[in-house]
Every structure is written in C-alpha cells, then in structure tokens.
Amino acid sequence: MATVGNADRHRERAEAQQRAATVASRRRRSSAALSTHLAHQPGSSDGRKIAAVDKNIEMIDKVPDSYASTKVGTLFAGQRALGCPLRLALPDSSAVAGCPELAACLELQSPPWVHAPCSSAAQKLYLSKNSLRSLAGVEQFRELRALSVADNLLADFDCLAPLAAAGIALEAAFFEGNPMADLPNYRAQVIHRLGPTLAVLDNRLVPAAGASSSWAA
C-alpha cells in the first residue's frame, strides 16, 4: 500500500510540475486579448465558431458585434424577379424602402418581401490552452452552445458565474486541465451551476436532470 501511495504522490507531483512548466512557457510569449487575436486573424471565426487555441489569450474582452450577438435581418424576395427565392442580409426593412434602385431591380414596387430578424452570433467558442483566469466577457456570446476552455488557469467554480448570470444555455463544456477540475465534486458542481441544458462535460455525457445530486451531500 505504501508503494501505491508513493506512486500516486509521484504522479501528482509530476503533473503539477508539468502544469507549472506549461504556464511558464505561455507567460514567456506575448499575451493577448481575444479581440486583438481576432483583429490579427479574422479567419479564426466563420461566423458561428471562434477558434483561438494556444494563442496565450489572457482575457475575453469586448469583441466586435459581428462576432458576438449581431442581429441582422433576412429579406425573403419572391420568385417574380429572379425565378428563385433570394435572401439578402440587411440591417432592417428600410434598407429596401430607401433604395428605389434595389426595389426596381427586384420588381418590388408592391413589396412581396418579408423582413425576418435572425441571429448571426458565435455558437461555439474554442479557447483551450490559453492563460484565462476568468470567463468574464463570455456573457457577450448570448447564443453560445459549446465552450472549450480546457488547459487554462481557471481556479474555482466562481469562474462559471458569468455564464449563469447571462443565462447562456450551454450544451457542451470542456474545463479539463484547469485547477478548478481538481476540486472536490468538480463534475457535480459544474453540472449544477451550468443548468439543465448541459449534455456533455469534458467529453462525457451528463446524467439526466435529477439523476445525481452528490454535490449537495
């Protein structure tokens, strides 16, 4: 038994040393905010997903609305002009009313079009292997459904507060490799705090609501 205990302590010490070496390596590189990374590498987003893995990002600051929660409209034009449905992304219906040339081109003098609001916001945020100590700022991504922040520096469950406060309905979350993941009742606490929409945590399915309440013990 003593041999097993020593082996466990040795493994834990090695893992702690590896984490410390990783943190030190990241700190030697220049740090960045998420908005700075997106400004320099706009290809990191495809409109529905933002991927900035291992970029030494230290904070989720305010990003342009086009990445977070921009509301646009979709103009559905009939088939009369072009022989097929046409969709145009416009800020509001006045964009057509204020442009006679566009209306004439689409033969919309008596507009058979419908302006339907829709969301063009990121639903997936991949920020693993960075230097995040907080999730403050994530609340701007109101349509977020998947969040991956594994291998960061998130220390405790209070880091999850911005998600709950904003009412973000996450379906998948990844926190492995953070100090928080080593705390007692880690899975039960995260599942409880993120709410009933969470279906996957760290690549493992979440039990149905009410199936586990060990966090309260």
Image (cartoon, rainbow, N blue to C red):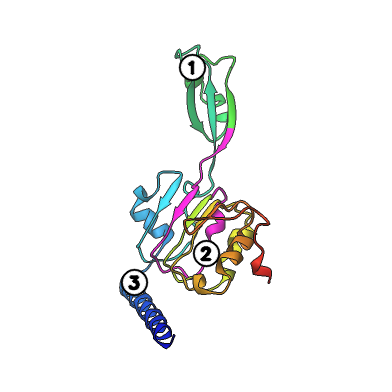
Q: Label 3 near label 1: C-beta < 8 Å?
A: no
Residue span colored magenta? 117-144
**Labels 2 and 1: the sequence-earlier one:** 1
Kind of residue at disc 2: Leu
> Is 211 displayed left or right of 7 in the figure?
right
Spatial CA span between label 1 and label 3: 55 Å
The residue shown at (57%, 21%) is 113
Secondary structure of the residue carrying numbered label 1: loop
Mark 3 and 2 residues: CB-CB less than 8 Å, in contact?
no
The disc, 1 or 3, on the residue closer to the chain's N-terminal end is 3
Q: Is residue 2 above or below residue 81?
A: below
Per the model, the C-alpha gap separating discs 3 and 2 is: 18 Å
Q: Secondary structure at mark 3?
A: helix
Q: Quadrant of residue 71?
A: top right
Residue 126 percent across, percent down from the top left: 43, 55
Q: Amino acid at mark 1?
A: Leu
Could you tell me the amino acid type at mark 3? Arg
Residue 54: percent from left, percent from top: 35, 62
Instruction: Give the number of the disc on residue 135.
Output: 2
In three-dimensional space, the C-alpha distance between marks 2 and 1, rounded to whole angstroms, equals: 46 Å
Residue 119 magenta-drawn?
A: yes
Percent of width and height locating residue 152: 43, 68
Q: Which residue is mark 3?
A: 26
Q: Residue at label 1?
A: 106
Residue for point 34% across, 71% down: 26
Work out which residue is located at the far bottom of the displayed protein and give it. 2
Which sits in the foreground, 216 or 145?
216
Residue at 33% of width from left, 77% of height from top?
Answer: 21
The crowd level at tag 1 (other Cα within 10 Å; few <14, some 14-19, many 20+) is some
